[in-house]
Structure formats: structure tokens, C-alpha cells
Amino acid sequence: MFDSPSLSANQLLMGLPSEEYKRLAPYLKPVSLFLGQVIYEPKQLIKEVYFPVGSMISLVSIMKDNSTTEIGLVGNEGMVGVPVFLGGNTATNRVVVQVQGNALKMDASILKSEFEKGEKLQQKLLLYTQARLTQISQIAACKSHHLIEERLARWLLSVNDCVNRDELPLTQKFISQMLGVRRASVTEAAIALQKAGFISYSRGQITILQRKQLEEAACECYGLIRDEFQRLLT
């Protein structure tokens, strides 16, 4: 666990005026998130919100047969617990830690109270929500129109952005669950990207070697999502 909240570690917090951040800082509690930790289950009342710092958290849709597909991912650029300030107060999907690391935790009631003050935090959270909606809708379109190799490249780049490191502790099983495809399909796509020299792939570990080339191998969805987050939040 790290020692104190860091203004520069989470982009949403980094974008706040210093006086607003100072008001929030006493309520931001550093926590360590572990792989597979479930933050929320569907229909669960949200009592705490999280601002990732070096961790990645997935929003996962669960079907009746228990099959899963990732519909959104959150890292250093954002937060989980959006329904709190939109007025819904309950989670609509499973929210689970997929790359372990740190986060800043805050009581949901504090966030809602600060949001209702109508200051910079409110503006940032609303813009973040717009960017998140773009991410979710583009991921949905991506599943219907793009090849698994392109989708895998897009997803690896997004994870890389979330945690700001090239070594990603990811298994075939996990990736297949997040992309909603067979493990064999993930293996074939990863081998193709490795043969091209864009990544190295070993059991439980993927390292991005050539990011620029990986971006070229990804579908257009990666650039669209990235550009929207930058436009709205930078």
C-alpha cells in the first residue's frame, strides 16, 4: 500500500483545482486491490467509489449461463461508482479487479455531496461519464465488426493505458472471458501478434514491445476511444 493520496496518480483527481483536491484529500483512503477482487455485484448498493492508481478494473456483463464479456475498463484515467452521482446508487454490472494495484477509495456519500456543489469535480465527472459511454458503445460495435486479432490489439493497448506499464499479467482464460471469445481464438491472435514482434507472450504474462506497430494492428475503435477521453478530459 502506498503512503498517501497522490494528486498526479489519477487523471480525474489531477484535473481538479488545488483547493478542491485539498478538500477531498482527507476522504481519499489508499487501498491495495488484488486480482479478482469484486468491487460491486449487479444491483448492489454502492457505498464506496474508487479512483484507480496503477490498477485496472473491468465492468463485466454476466449472462444467465454465467458467460462473461467486458463492456468497459477503468484505470488511472477514471473512477468506478458512476451511478452514485447520476442518482442510481446501485451497480448494473459486476465490477472486478483485473490488474492488481492501488486505488483511492472514498465514501459514496462524500462524492455525491461534493458533486452537488457544482464545481470542477462535477464537470469532470460528467465529461468522464460521456467518455465512458463512448467507450462502452464502441466496444459493443467492435465485437460485431472486427477480427479477434484487431480486437486483442485494441484491448491490450487499452489495458496499457489504464496501468501505464508494458508488462501485463494476463492469462488466456481471462482475456477470452473479457473479449467473449474462445481461448483458442485468443491464443491464435496472440501468436500472430508475437510473430509480428509487437508483443511477447508467455504463460500469464504479455509484454508490449512495439506500441506504435500494435496501434497499427488494432482496429479503429482504439483511436476513437482514446481520442474521446483526451478531448473531454485532458
Image: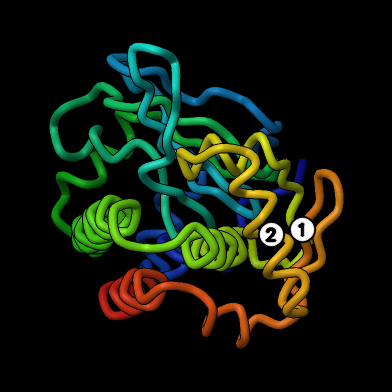
> In the rendered picture of this protein, how many numbered marks are placed on residues?
2
Q: Secondary structure at mark 2?
A: helix
Question: Is residue 86 among the parts visible in the rendering?
Answer: yes
Q: Relative to 233, is 70 above or below?
A: above
Q: Residues within 10 Å of mark 2 (few under 14, many from 20)?
A: many
Image coords of residue 122 (percent x, y): 21, 55
Image coords of residue 204 (percent x, y): 81, 44
Residue found at x 15% / y 39%: 86
Residue placed under numbered mark 2 in the picture: 190
Question: Is residue 125 among the parts visible in the rendering?
Answer: no
Q: Which residue is nearer to you in this view: 223 or 122?
A: 223
Q: Quadrant of residue 212?
A: bottom right
Q: Secondary structure at mark 1?
A: strand
Q: Amino acid at mark 2?
A: Ala
Q: Which residue is nearer to you in this view: 216 or 187?
A: 187
Q: Which residue is nearer to you in this view: 50 or 143?
A: 143
Q: Are marks 2 and 1 in contact (CB under 8 Å)?
A: yes
Image coords of residue 188 (percent x, y): 66, 55
Q: Which residue is nearer to you in this view: 102 or 155?
A: 155
* Quarter of the figure that contains the N terminus: top right
Q: Relative to 98, is 95 above or below?
A: above
Q: Quadrant of residue 131?
A: bottom left
Q: Residues within 10 Å of mark 1 (few under 14, many from 20)?
A: some
Residue placed under numbered mark 1 in the picture: 206
Indicate which disc, 2 or 1, sits on the residue closer to the N terminus. 2
- Judge from the rendering whether residue 105 lies leftward or rightward of residue 87; answer left or right: right
Residue found at x 40% / y 18%: 41
Q: Relative to 150, is 181 above or below?
A: above
Residue found at x 57% / y 58%: 159
Q: Amino acid at mark 1?
A: Ile
